[in-house]
Every structure is written in structure tokens, then in C-alpha cells.
């Protein structure tokens, strides 16, 4: 039963191989995994890009069918062929322990190689990306390098402007410094003048105060005299009234 | 003048009534009776004061309503007890300074005095500042504080309703300009004032005045500010008068004013001013009811007053201007001024002198002091500020009791700040100011 199945598979492989000679390899290869799809986790990896598959085209066909050894077949017919097949069948059974181990080893090697291929592919992809990035950066660098002279010119211009501005600011600062000095001197002069004026004004106010107090003093003494006189008159009137 | 007037004043942009009246009626003018010159009785500025003076009994108690700076201070010469009340505290202080016995700040509708406190209640240029709705309250207060036989005397600004715009007809701007001139918020015609008084006093007499006689300043003010139709060339002529010419004009006007009173000449009403007299008791003559001007002419040598400035028997001639508060109270002199006085003995004359002439450093002011024509002293004034001058009197000059002190200045100065300012018409040429002239 199993052998029939294997036989069918091999027939299918044959058909495909024969069809692959007429079709582009990529098409044939593209279908290959389906023909050998396995249920297990270590089945064939995802389809490889065509460019990558070219180099490893033979690898998929080496995939094993689990615990099944390939059937013993022959293209020949006749008795000899049957004899041959029978002997081979016997050998297959006798050397199953060796063949199976070999097959296992082959499968493991195959799987490892697939993983290596996959890793290499990924590495290659990464490398390609890096290369692309490098190219892009190189391009960018080129562009930057091309703008560098104009930037340098601009920087020089800005530098010149800044220098001119600084020179102007310096000149202005000097002017302001001079102005501050002048104003300081003027303020001092005004302060001196104001102090002198204040002194004079103080003197005048002091004099004014003195004269005002003098006037008040005179008025006070006059009031006192008048009050005294009025008091005396009042007393005289009272005396007169009493008499 | 009172709180209800605030609305009208506020509409005119006057928010501080006390300050408004301070600026209008307080100046550095000296109204103290001790500085009054007898000749000033003819000055039209004192015409209303003289009307009151001649109608007030000596020794009476007088309340001056709206006393201002103290225009009635002269009444002190008659020995009256003079009390002033004003809405402005500054005015009250100024009146006190000018010799009022007491002054207070109060509303005229709430006088802070007991009933029947005064023999006379007087107001000059006040009732025109009282709003119509408050006039009756003011008159009621006057009636309350007046003695039963007392007399109330008033000089009141009037209007002519036929010829002039009423305040209620004015727009905001017109009202503002009108009230800003003097603060008149209650102008009425002469007979309307009289009618109001009749509601409170059984005896009322009134006379329209100032239809003829106005001071030169008042002529110009009435023409410029109130738009009275005086002849333009006459007003221009008045504008050009010098200080002394204006004084002469005012003296002439005052003389005519007093003669109209003396002769009882009846003037037509002119919508300018009314003198009004009212009393609960029958009234005496409208003019000169208690005329006694002897105290204006004190000739006795009153040596109890040590300073000649305040002695009423001392005569300052026309070389001196009216006393001003500089301070202190002092008289400005022109180029020369004479002081005539009597002194029983004279050994020394001392006086305080100042000048405001600005360029004394470059050109000092020369001052000479002469007594009876003889030079006593000459000095140069190098700085502004008060100086005390003491001059000994030589023995040969003491032979007489009548003296004439003369001061001469080498130059004068016109302190008018802006000669182009038409409102600033003080063109006095002054040299020195003198006060505290004491003879010993």
C-alpha cells in the first residue's frame, strides 16, 4: 500500500521533471514544494526567490518521506528484472538499519543546509539592504558634499556680516559709553548746579523764615501791648462801673 | 456752594468745590485792616466793603457768609466781632489770616451757630453761587442766626433774563464755560432776589448798583467772559492801561460809586448787581446808616505798634504798592518810596529788604536810605533773599518828631512772566520789597 503511494509520488516526480525540461525552471520549482509537501515541522522552508533557487535546485528533491524508504523499482522488465528487484528488496530489508540511518542523516543534512540557505538568504538580504542604505547615504553624502561649497560661502558671508555687526555694535557701544560719560559729567555738573541753587534757595528760605518769625514776633508783642491796653481799659471801665 | 449744587458744578467739570473757590478767591493780596490805606476807600474794589462798613454799628457782631479771603476785614476798624464762614477751608484760613476773629468751613444751609447770634449777617458775591433750590434754605439760616433787630446786608450778582441766556438753556459746553468763570449757578434778577428775601424778612430794601461803575478789570471781564456789549475801543483802551493808570481809573470809579450812595442817586436795574438790605425790624437808611469813618483815619501816633508797616498813622506814598503775602507780608516798591511817620525818639531804623530781580550777580541793585532828605546809608544788594538793614540815626536828625524815610533803588524789574498774555496785566515795575520797618 505504502509502496503504491511511493510509486505514485515518484511517477509524479518523473512527470514533473519531464515537464520541467519543457517549462522554465522557475515554474517547475515553484510547484515543487507542493509535490513534496510534508506534514511535519521540518518540512521545506518557504519558497525561495528564483535567483536563490537556481543554485540549490536539487535540494528539494532530496526531501525524505519520513519512515519510508524509496521503493525498489526497475525500468527493466523480464525475469532478470524481477530477480533484481527481489534481490534489491531483500537487500533493502537487510540494510534497512543502515539505509534508514543514512536517510536520516541525509535528511538532517538537508534540513541543515536549508536553514543555512535561509540564513544565508537573510544575511544576503540584510547585506543588500545595508548596501542600498550605504548607497543612499553615499548619495546623500555626495549631495551634501555638493552643497558644502555654497554652505561654506554662506557661512563666510554670515561671518562677515556678524563681524560687521559686531564692529557696528562695538562702535555703538563706544558711542554709548561716551554718551554715558558725557551724561555722567553733565549730571555731575547739574548736580553741582542744583546743589548750589539749593544752597542759595535754602539760604533764601532760611532768611524768609527768619523775617517771618520776626514779623510774627513783632505782631505778638504788638498784640500783647494791645491786649494789655484793652485789659487796662476794661479794668478802668469796671472800676468806673463799680464806683 | 452747597451739596445740591454739586450736580450743576459737576456738569461744568468742577468736582472739588473748595479748591475751585480757593483758586478764585484766595490770592496773596493782604486785606488785613492794619494795612488798609484810607485812600483805598475810594477804590471801586472796596466799594461794597465801604457800603457794609458804613452800615454796620461799631462793636457789633458780624457774620460774613462766604467770606472768601476776607473782604470785610476792614470792619475790624470799627471794633466789630467778625466771624467768617466759607465752603473752602483755604478761604476760611485766609480770612482768619486777614484778621477775622473766627472762621469756619460749613455749608450755608447748615450754619454752625446758635439762633440769634449776630447783629449783622453779610454776604458779598455769594448768593449768585447758591443754587435756586437752596436759596430759601440759606435765607432761612440767615433769619435764624440773625438777632431780632439785626440787619442782613448782601451784595448779589444778578442777571438779565431778557438779554442773557439762562443756565438751563445752555448746552454742556456753554454751561461749563459760564460756570468756570465765577461759579455762578444761581443768578436771578434784582427784583427776584428781593422777592425771596420778602418771604423771610418783613423789611427789605434794594438798590441796583454797578450799572455805571465797574473796575477796569471788571469791565474787561464782563466784556470778554460774559459778552456784555461795551464799546470795543473803550475795552481796548482799558486793556492798554498801566497798573497805575488802572488804579487811577478804579479810584475814579469808586469815587463816583460812593457819591451815588451819598447822594442817594437811584440807578436803573442793569442785570449786573444788587445791594440788598433786609431785617425783621424796620430798616434805617439804605446808605450810611452808621457812617463813622474816623477809624479809617487814625492820626494819633500809636507807638504800641512797633512796626511802621502796620501803623495806621504811618503813610506809605504812591511809590509803594499794596502789601502782598510773599511771605511774610511786605510791600513792593517802585524806583523810590517814602514813609511818613512820627516818632518821639529815633535812634535806629531797621527794616527787612528783599528783591526778586534775577541778574544781581552781573548787576547789583543799589539801595539808598534817606531820612528827611539826608542820606543815611547806601548799599548794594548782590543776592536774592531777605536782608536786614540797620541804620543809625545821627543826633542832628533827631531834632524833629516828624520823619520821612525814603528808599531809592537804582533800577526796577517787571516780573510779568508772559507779556503777551492778555489776562496777565500786571505791568508793575518793582525793585525791592520791605517789611518789619521798626524805629527805635
Image (spheres, coloured by chain):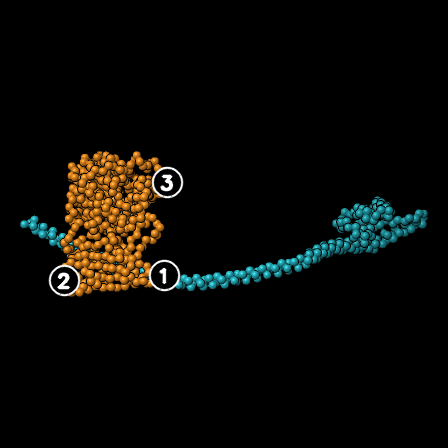
Chain colours: A cyan, B orange
Residue B280 visible in rendering: yes
Residue at figure coordinates x 31%, y 48% from the top left:
B240
Residue B117 visible in rendering: no
Q: Which residue is mark 3?
A: B173
Which of the image's four quarters has the N terminus of chain A?
top right
Q: Mark 2 and mark 1, same subunit?
A: no
Secondary structure of the residue carrying numbered label 2? helix
Question: Badge 1, how many Cα within 10 Å: few under 14, some, many 20+?
Answer: some
Q: Which residue is mark 1?
A: A194
Q: Which circle, 2 or 1, is nearer the viewer?
A: 2
Q: Which circle, 1 or 3, is nearer the viewer?
A: 3
Residue at figure coordinates x 54%, y 61% from the top left:
A168
Residue B215 placement (x, y as % from top left): 26, 45
The mark nearer the N terminus, 2 or 3, is 3
Residue B56 placement (x, y as % from top left): 17, 44
Q: Chain of mark 1?
A: A
Marker disc for residue B388? none
Residue B41 placement (x, y as % from top left): 20, 47
Q: Which residue is mark 2?
A: B399
Amino acid at each position: 500500500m505504502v509502496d503504491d503511494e511511493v510509486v505514485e509520488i515518484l511517477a509524479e516526480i518523473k512527470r514533473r521533471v519531464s515537464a520541467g525540461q519543457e517549462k522554465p525552471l522557475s515554474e517547475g520549482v515553484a510547484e515543487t514544494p507542493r509535490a513534496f509537501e510534508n506534514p511535519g515541522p521540518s518540512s521545506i522552508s518557504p519558497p525561495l526567490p528564483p535567483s536563490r533557487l537556481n543554485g540549490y535546485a536539487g535540494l528539494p528533491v532530496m526531501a525524505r518521506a519520513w519512515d519510508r524508504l524509496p521503493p525498489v523499482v526497475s525500468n527493466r522488465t523480464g525475469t532478470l528484472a524481477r530477480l533484481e528487484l527481489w534481490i534489491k528488496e531483500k537487500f533493502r530489508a537487510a540494510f534497512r538499519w543502515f539505509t534508514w540511518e543514512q536517510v536520516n542523516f541525509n535528511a538532517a543534512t538537508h534540513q541543515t543546509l536549508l536553514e543555512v540557505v535561509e540564513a544565508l538568504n537573510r544575511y544576503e538580504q540584510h547585506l543588500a539592504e545595508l548596501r542600498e542604505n550605504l548607497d543612499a547615504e553615499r548619495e546623500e553624502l555626495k549631495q551634501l558634499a555638493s552643497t558644502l561649497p555654497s554652505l561654506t560661502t554662506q557661512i563666510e558671508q554670515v561671518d562677515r556680516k556678524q563681524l560687521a555687526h559686531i564692529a557696528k555694535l562695538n562702535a555703538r557701544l563706544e558711542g554709548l559709553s561716551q554718551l554715558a560719560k558725557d551724561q555722567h559729567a553733565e549730571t555731575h555738573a547739574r548736580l553741582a548746579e542744583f546743589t548750589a541753587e539749593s544752597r542759595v534757595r535754602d539760604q533764601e528760605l532760611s532768611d524768609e523764615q527768619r523775617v517771618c518769625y520776626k514779623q510774627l514776633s513783632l505782631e505778638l508783642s504788638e498784640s500783647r501791648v494791645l491786649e494789655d491796653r484793652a485789659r487796662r481799659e476794661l479794668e478802668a471801665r469796671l472800676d468806673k462801673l463799680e464806683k | 456752594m452747597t451739596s445740591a449744587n454739586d450736580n450743576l458744578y459737576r456738569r461744568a467739570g468742577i468736582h472739588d468745590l473748595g479748591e475751585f473757590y480757593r483758586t478764585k478767591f484766595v490770592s496773596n493780596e493782604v486785606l488785613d485792616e492794619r494795612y488798609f490805606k484810607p485812600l483805598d476807600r475810594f477804590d471801586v474794589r472796596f466799594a461794597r466793603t465801604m457800603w457794609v462798613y458804613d452800615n454796620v454799628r461799631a462793636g457789633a457782631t458780624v457774620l460774613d457768609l462766604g467770606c472768601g479771603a476776607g473782604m470785610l476785614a476792614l470792619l475790624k476798624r470799627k471794633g466789630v466781632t467778625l466771624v467768617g464762614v466759607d465752603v473752602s477751608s483755604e478761604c476760611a484760613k485766609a480770612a482768619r489770616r486777614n484778621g477775622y476773629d473766627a472762621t469756619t468751613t460749613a455749608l450755608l444751609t447748615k450754619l454752625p451757630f446758635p439762633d440769634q447770634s449776630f447783629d449783622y449777617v453779610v454776604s458779598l458775591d455769594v448768593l449768585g453761587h447758591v443754587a435756586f433750590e437752596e436759596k430759601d434754605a440759606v435765607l432761612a439760616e440767615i433769619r435764624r442766626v440773625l438777632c431780632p433787630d439785626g440787619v442782613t446786608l448782601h451784595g448779589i450778582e444778578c442777571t438779565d433774563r431778557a438779554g442773557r441766556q439762562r443756565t438751563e438753556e445752555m448746552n454742556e459746553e456753554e454751561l461749563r464755560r459760564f460756570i468756570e468763570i465765577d461759579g455762578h449757578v444761581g443768578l436771578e434778577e434784582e427784583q427776584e432776589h428781593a422777592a425771596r428775601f420778602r418771604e423771610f424778612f418783613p423789611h427789605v430794601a434794594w438798590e441796583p448798583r454797578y450799572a455805571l461803575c465797574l473796575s477796569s478789570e471788571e469791565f474787561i471781564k464782563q466784556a470778554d467772559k460774559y459778552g456784555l456789549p461795551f464799546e470795543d475801543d473803550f475795552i481796548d483802551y482799558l486793556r492798554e492801561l498801566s497798573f497805575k493808570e488802572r488804579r487811577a481809573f478804579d479810584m475814579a470809579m469808586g469815587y463816583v460809586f460812593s457819591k451815588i450812595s451819598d447822594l442817594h442817586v437811584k440807578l436803573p436795574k442793569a442785570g449786573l448787581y444788587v445791594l440788598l438790605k433786609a431785617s425783621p425790624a424796620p430798616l434805617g437808611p439804605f446808605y450810611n446808616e452808621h457812617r463813622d469813618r474816623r477809624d479809617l483815619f487814625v492820626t494819633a501816633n500809636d507807638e504800641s505798634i512797633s512796626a511802621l508797616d502796620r501803623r495806621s498813622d504811618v503813610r506809605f506814598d504812591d511809590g509803594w504798592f499794596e502789601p502782598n503775602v510773599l511771605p511774610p507780608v511786605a510791600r513792593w516798591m517802585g524806583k523810590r518810596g517814602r514813609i511818613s511817620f512820627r516818632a518821639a525818639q529815633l535812634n535806629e531804623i531797621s527794616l527787612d529788604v528783599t528783591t526778586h530781580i534775577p541778574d544781581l550777580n552781573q548787576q547789583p541793585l543799589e539801595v539808598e536810605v534817606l531820612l528827611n532828605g539826608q542820606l543815611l546809608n547806601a548799599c548794594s544788594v548782590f543776592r536774592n533773599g531777605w536782608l536786614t538793614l540797620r541804620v543809625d540815626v545821627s543826633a542832628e536828625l533827631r531834632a524833629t518828631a516828624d520823619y520821612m524815610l525814603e528808599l531809592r533803588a537804582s533800577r526796577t524789574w517787571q516780573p510779568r512772566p508772559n507779556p503777551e498774555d492778555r489776562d496777565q496785566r500786571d505791568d508793575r515795575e518793582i525793585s525791592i520789597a520791605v517789611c518789619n520797618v521798626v524805629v527805635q
